[in-house]
Image: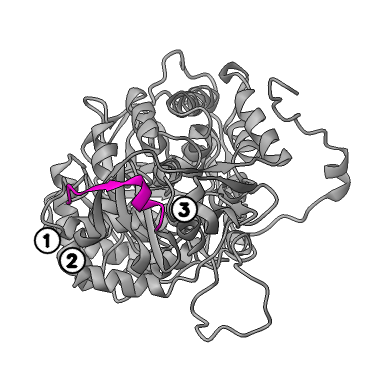
Amino acid sequence: MLRSQFRNVLRNVKPFHAGGKRSVASSTLSSSSTHSKQQSRSSRVLAASVASVTAAAASYFLVQPSLANDEAATASSNRKIPVEEFVKHNTADDCWITVNGNVYDLTDFIDMHPGGTTPLIQNAGHDATVLYNKIHPKGTIENFLPKEKQLGVLVGEAPKIEIIIDDKEKHRLELLEHLPALSRIQNIYDFEYIASRVLTEQAWNYYSCGAEDEITMRENHYAYQRIYFRPKCCVNVQDVDTSTTLLGSKSSVPFYVSAAASAKLGHDDGECSIARGAGKEGVIQMISSFSSYSLDEIAESRIPGATQWFQLYVNEDKDVVKRTIKKAEDLGMKAIFVTVDAANRGNREKDIRMRITEDHDELDEDHSVRAGSTSGAMPSFIDKRLTWDEVKDIIGLTKLPVMLKGVQRTEDIEKAIDIGCQGVVLSNHGGRQLDTAPPPIEVMAESVPILKAKGKLDPNFNIFVDGGVRRGTDILKALAIGGKDCKVAVGLGRPFLYANTGYGEKGVRKAIQILREEMKADMRMLGVTNLNELDESCIDTRRLVGRDAVNNVFNNNYYPMSQIKFKNE
């Protein structure tokens, strides 16, 4: 039943290709003489689709828990299939591929593939192992494809598609070989700039985009710039302590790695290298439902003593929700974060523009689907009927702390308190959902005094905030707004995707170290020695509500810091 529902959802996802100026270039075939049809194709595009990553991860997390055997990692049939037989099945109407030595019949799946029809048709009768492993979580095809379509084991070596790389892609790959030394990276912005140069254009647009005019995405950060400190002097600040406890787990800092999808686009180890890097620095990792590695693999990458949380998109099938929460518990997750700001796909035009399939002047009959959108696949699995009563049901399913992620107004914080949530994450999905939604730090500054006056706040109630954080000063400002009236922590998503890009675990650790050292220096200059001393007396929020006029004369004369250089520049 669930599989058929999932297939019906995927039929509504329009196919697309990865276009754009940084696409991996056209490719030709290196095939045996039995591939005359395939050899007649003069060129192809083999860029890894971002939507394939996301939707494949979704199929793992949201479909896999319904299967009887979580360990189904190999083809069910032991049938031996000679390569001479395999290569004959090389058309859209008869599409076999081999992955990791196993043969699969994907003919009936072509029209449902979230990444579009092109990648499957191109790889018909070919070994697709490299492309598949690059963008899919382990176990996706085994757990999703019906057993009768898992045909057996390949005997012999299947042809592979030879990728011809264009000049722009060569330059990108050359930059990857000449990454700046970690010792030269001074701030989080350096990682972002490096990622913009070494990611494929598809991946960069997916990571960096916001919704529509991207006003909210930018305001998330600008809002922090409108908060000013009120430093104290003549305080002994020889020793400062950035450690804290979040949801019962110790953390070396009051910030955590927020859930973000598809980390594998930036580094082969994806969320697993983020897990190792965060764990070694004593920082908590929140794992996305749409990670590019399975929850099992990311949990296995957790170092002893490290803490991980699980971010949950609520599926329409409540049995799936129960099994997913149970799986998260069994794998040692320490909290459940229920996402409540994704009832509809965000209109992320920068990402969508990269994936328009074809040029035509016909109107789409289904106006609810934006062609080629990564976000068009994701929310199809999400329950659009999620209510406060259902949230209460989820709280009743687990003994773990339950937080609501994506709260954007004071009244909803109050409701979360009333129904027994451990806390909320003030978040607008990094500006990727409803454009002109308020910056989370503004919501916090507005809400804390109101809830305090009502007697609603408790020092044990958690108000976390994410979106736009780039400096240690941003983190300290959020903590000061919450003060002693609630427990505050700050989430960073994109910055750790960028730090992971190219550098993996070491990049993640470097980013954490940068932020921690910024916090220590800022605390000394602010006149505080531990996080408990931060309160509203440390900040001035009078400029927070309102917008500053831009002084173009000043801006034109301002000499900005130069960008970090690659080793070959």
Q: Residue at x 62, y 36 (%)?
A: 198
> Which residue is nearer to you in this view: 197 or 557?
197
Q: Position of residue 40 (x, y in %)?
A: 60, 57
Residue at 66% in and 35% down: 172
Amino acid type assigned to the residue bearing label 1 in the image: Gly
Q: Which residue is mark 3?
A: 123
Question: In this image, 118 relative to 320: left or right?
Answer: right
Residue 180 in the image: state x and y as whole percent: 63, 22
What residue lies at 73% left-to-right and 39% top-to-bottom? 167
Q: Which mark is residue 361?
A: none
Q: Which residue is mark 2?
A: 392
Circle nearer the viewer, 3 or 2 = 3
Q: Which residue is mark 1?
A: 396
Residue drawn at x 87%, y 43% as measured from the top left: 556
Q: Nearer the viewer, residue 443 or 64?
A: 64
How far is the residue under mark 1 from the one under mark 2? Answer: 6 Å
Determine whether 390 is above or below 244 in the image: below
To which quarter of the image does residue 89 belong?
Answer: bottom left
Report if the CB atoms under discs 1 and 3 are less than 8 Å apart: no
126 to 520, vertically: above or below? below
289 and 256: which is toward the camera: 289
Asked which secondary structure carries label 2, the reply is helix
Q: Which residues are magenta?
A: 77-88
In contact (CB < 8 Å): disc 1 and disc 2: yes
Amino acid marked by disc 3:
Asn
Asked whether residue 441 is in view, the answer is no
Does label 1 or label 3 sit earlier along the sequence? 3
Image-quadrant location for residue 164: top right
Q: Residues within 10 Å of mark 2 (few under 14, many from 20)?
A: some
- How far apart are the alpha carbons under marks 3 and 2? 46 Å
Q: Nearer the viewer, mark 1 or mark 3?
A: 3
